[in-house]
Image (cartoon, helix red, strand yellow):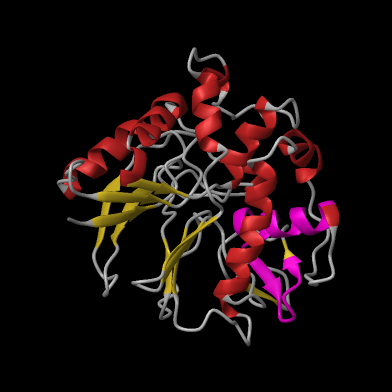
Amino acid sequence: MATYAIGDVQGCFEQLQQLLKKLEYNPDKDKLWFAGDIVNRGPQSLETLRFIKSLGDRAVTVLGNHDLHLLAIANGRGKQGKKDTIQSILDAPDRNELLDWLIQQPLMHYDETLDVCMVHAGIHPQWTIAEALDYASEVEAFLQSTKAHEFFQHMYGDKPLKWSPKLRGWDRLRFITNVFTRMRYCDINGKLSLRDKGPPGKQAPGIVPWFEVNGFKTGNTRLIFGHWSTLPDPGLENIYPLDTGCLWGGKLSALKVNKKLKKLTRIRCPEAQPIDTRHGKKKNKTISLL
């Protein structure tokens, strides 16, 4: 039996199937972890969502910003963008079943035996693993309650940018959600910099990747995450980025989850979305998302 963590699929269903074939994935024995953003922007969001849901307890999925965006649109909040590819899900006959399953997924998965954590974007540098699990559960409880529609009404937005345990209400839930699903950079005091999205070296002065903030509190726990398609492997112990830009003509990556976390398997992907020229990227480069 093997477990594989897979980076952002974003509706690239054919590439996911090719990757599983390369892994010699055995659905009767193996388990898959998905690092969020399983839907949107790619050509087959509906097929991807149906497939991952069909895996049942053989798969673990954490919610990404695009997954939450789909749920918000389905709840009458937010607005679809020109590049969104979620309408097929919203029009599907099994729409409610799919969305009910998706909203039950966590923001954070932690394997205590291996001391491995998976999130979509990151963990705030001022949080321990135990604290992060508690904060994730606050948002999950709201999503899985009858008040979910209220959450989506207040989900969008960048503020507050600074964490305090004294945060309350929608500000607290929005901050926690932004950390787990949108964060890339912080300042040295842990203040979020959500407007910086490119590769390290392009950010504003005084801003660093979230995992390079001094005093980072997750200890020796190994962290698997997606979201940041322009992030090269930082070569840091316990840090495992898995979004390698499949959607933008990069690769789809899988990491074997075991005591070593050394074996990476990748496939090359055709470009499923044109490059957003607002980010000034050339055609053969990948770009970051929301």
Q: Nearer the viewer, residue 54 or 216?
A: 54
User: Which contiguous range is marked in magenta?
Assistant: 170-192
Q: Quadrant of residue 249?
A: top left
Question: Looking at the picture, how far across and down is residue 57, in whole percent?
Answer: 35, 44
Relative vertical location of residue 10 with respect to residue 94 in this rendering, above or below? below
Q: Do we see residue 274 in this rendering?
A: no
The residue lying at 27 percent from left, 74 percent from top is: 259
Quadrant in which the N terminus appears: bottom left
Q: Nearer the viewer, residue 70 or 11?
A: 70
Q: Do we see residue 220 in this rendering?
A: yes
Relative vertical location of residue 39 with respect to residue 224 in this rendering, above or below? above
The residue lying at 69 percent from left, 33 percent from top is: 72
Question: Looking at the picture, how far across and down is residue 246, in whole percent?
Answer: 40, 44
Q: How many marks?
A: 0
Q: Is residue 176 left or right of residue 3?
A: right
Q: Quadrant of residue 78?
A: top right
